[in-house]
Image (cartoon, helix red, strand yellow):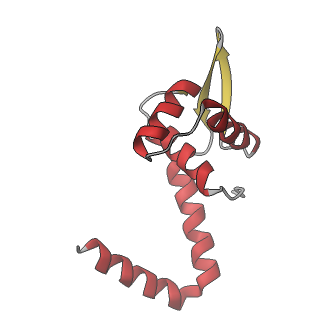
Amino acid sequence: MELQSLTNCEKIVMKTVWDAERELDLADITQRVNEMYDKEWKPQTVSTFLARLVKKGYLQHYRQGRVFYYQILVPQREYLGVMAERFAEFWKQENVDIFLEALRKRAAF
């Protein structure tokens, strides 16, 4: 699947949605982002990132009353798989081996 790249801020918002046990609205997402990532983002800022994620095909939203809820279209596992493939293609096999060795050493701490 061809996924568009995410900015660091979009990744933070998307990870917040992925980590949730239910569909979230803007207020929930804003609160969680600010708490989990030590941010002070306003709802308008988070709303901008959510709109970008909808446009890029990662999320869709629906309205229930006056509130919009966000549904995941790209599961986290799929995203991570595509990102791992891109990483491996860019760095080539020999560098991926070095990366995995470094990752194993870091995980041992």
Q: Which residue is nearer to you in this view: 32 or 63?
A: 32
Where is residue 10? Give x, y as percent.
Answer: 62, 49
Relative vertical location of residue 109 with respect to residue 24 in this rendering, above or below: below
**The N terminus is located in which quarter?**
bottom right
Relative vertical location of residue 80 with respect to residue 23 in this rendering, above or below: below
Give the residue drawn at x 45%, y 82%. Answer: 99
Q: Residue furthest right?
A: 55
**The C terminus is located in which quarter?**
bottom left
Q: Which residue is nearer to you in this view: 16 or 9?
A: 9
Where is residue 93? Give x, y as percent.
Answer: 54, 87
Residue 24, visible in the rendered structure: yes
Q: Is residue 106 left or right of residue 69?
A: left
Residue 75, visible in the rendered structure: no
Q: Which residue is nearer to you in this view: 56 or 32?
A: 32
Give the residue drawn at x 41%, y 32%. Answer: 21
Q: Quadrant of residue 88?
A: bottom right
Q: Residue furthest top?
A: 65
Give the residue drawn at x 72%, y 37%. Answer: 51
Q: Quadrant of residue 47?
A: top right
Q: Residue furthest left?
A: 109
